[in-house]
Image (spheres, helix red, strand yellow):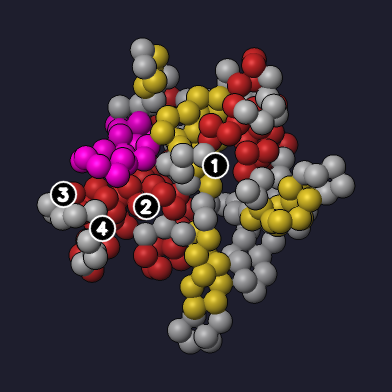
Amino acid sequence: GSGKTCSIASIVKAGYEVFVADTDNGVRVLRSTGLLTDEEQAKVKYLTFRDKSDGKPTAWNRLRETLITKGWVDGDTNYGKIDTWDSNRVLILDTLTFAGKAAINFVLNNNNRQLDAQLSPGEWGDAARALENLVAHITSDHLKCQVIVFTHLRHIEDETTGLSRSYPASVGAQLSTIIPRYFNDMYMITNRRNKEGVPMMKTVADGRMALKCSLPNKITGEVEADLGKILKTLAAT
């Protein structure tokens, strides 16, 4: 409800072809909002990676195959591995948080454990490493496509100061503090709207959130959540 759907629509309107790896089961709302024309909607491809409540979990393996090993295959259409995509394509992982849940399910299933079981420290580590390796791949320098990762927030208290800060919610507190190192730009969609009703984004860190912006002279501290415009600005440098 923060404006993520509007921000995805802005990417399409900027002329990009969008591929959404949907672990959050929420991208279908794009089809019903009226934000995109039929022609624009055709530029949005999405695959859903979410485990069912019954049966063997498959979401993590399918996500990893799509983003790392086999490539983006949708029915009879093979769009190739993301390593072969150019800068006109945008990969969106929506969300990191639920991708982490898929990794946890994968680890528990591999250990013949129920999906609602309490993870051991070793299992937490296995799931965290799997998710970090995925993030490392999609943020590799050799990729030419644009990459956006949506995430929920996790509040983590500093053991020394007692103050809490918000980090990307992933698998465990330690990985949540490591994930930001993989990105040059981290923004937060706020509850604020401009006079046209467009969601606003913060791009500058404060005491509560570790945000960062690689072009602070061109992307100001608070901007409209127009990710299409921001991608164009970043690509022009």
* Circle 3 or circle 4, nearest the eye: 4
Residue drawn at point x = 24 percent, y = 53 percent: 115
Residues under labels 4 and 2: Cα distance?
A: 14 Å
Question: Could you tell which of marks 4 and 2 lies nearer the N-terminus?
Answer: 2
Q: Residues within 10 Å of mark 1 (few under 14, many from 20)?
A: many
Q: Determine contact: label 2, label 3, CB under 8 Å.
A: no
Residue drawn at point x = 23 percent, y = 68 percent: 121
Under circle 2, the secondary element is: helix
Residue behind mark 1: 148
Under circle 4, the secondary element is: loop
Residues under labels 1 and 2: Cα distance?
A: 16 Å
Residue behind mark 2: 100
Residue 65 x, y percent position in the rendering: 30, 33
* Circle 4 or circle 2, nearest the eye: 4
- Answer above or below: position of 107 versus 67: below
Residue 42 x, y percent position in the rendering: 58, 18
Start-end of magenta stretch? 49-69
Residues under labels 2 and 3: Cα distance?
A: 15 Å
Residue type at mark 1?
Ile
Residue drawn at point x = 53 percent, y = 60 percent: 153
Residue type at mark 4?
Asp
* Circle 1 or circle 2, nearest the eye: 2
Residue behind mark 3: 110
Q: Which mark is residue 116?
A: 4
Quadrant where the image shows the C terminus: top right
Question: Could you tell which of marks 1 and 2 lies nearer the N-terminus?
Answer: 2
